[in-house]
Amino acid sequence: MYRLCVLFGIICSSLCAQVDRGYIVEVGDRAPQFIAKTIDGQIIDIKKNIGKVIMLKFTASWCGVCMHEMPVIEEEVWQKHKDNKDFIMIALTKDTDKKPQREKEIKTIIEKTGVTYPIGIDYNSKIFNMFAEKKAGVTRSIIIDQNGDIAFLTRLFKQDEFDEMKNTINKLLLK
């Protein structure tokens, strides 16, 4: 009986870990409003881009998963949709006091990954903290639909989830 209880506890904690991925928002919620600036000076205002599909990517130069995922996003999402006037993408570096993510770190990210999509600094992780818990892991993508609602959330890089995110983007752009 003891073994059965332990096994049940492990299964329950595993399921809870899959559900609780550090987000404080859910699919279907209105996306928090924010304005971000890329290192090349482009201003992205979520409120002014209602009507477009928005991909928001949180990243950091010290994040190994991010460095793996970013070139895949470049190839499979950005290169496919960058010329679509109904699609916007921005990656934001999760800046903290302990792990600053400023222009120098963004240049390192670009050199390591070869990405060409817009990247900005999320000073003091203010935008990150609108979507996720303060101490939550950085690697995550958020898809915001044309109504300004959250359509998809990812955490880490899992190919099946990534493919599902791409399908969500494609379906939204057909609307």
Image (cartoon, rainbow, N blue to C red):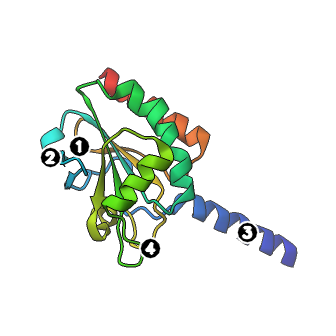
Q: Secondary structure at mark 3?
A: helix
Residue 142 visible? yes
Q: Earlier in the sequence, mark 3 or mark 4?
A: 3
- Are discs 1 and 2 less than 8 Å apart at CB? yes
Mark 4 residue element: loop
Give the Cα separation between the discs numbered 4 and 1: 25 Å
Q: Earlier in the sequence, mark 3 or mark 2?
A: 3
Q: Which residue is mark 3?
A: 10
- The local crowd at label 4, few if under 14, some if 14 to 19, many if 20 or more residues have their Cα within 10 Å, is few
Could you say which quadrant of the image residue 65 lies in?
bottom right
Which residue does the image show at 44% across and 60% down from the upper left?
A: 60
Residue at label 1?
A: 148
- The mark closer to the camera, 4 or 1, is 4
Picture disc at residue 133:
none
**Disc 3 to disc 2, how far (Cα)?**
43 Å
The reply to whether dot 3 and dot 4 touch (C-beta < 8 Å) is no
Label 3 and label 4: CA atoms lie apart by 24 Å
Q: Nearer the viewer, residue 39 or 170?
A: 39
Q: Which residue is labeled 4 in the image?
A: 135
Could you say whether the residue bearing mark 2 is in a helix, strand or loop?
helix
Q: Is residue 33 left or right of residue 105?
A: left
Q: Residue furthest left?
A: 48
| Type of amino acid at the residue the image marks with label 1 | Gly
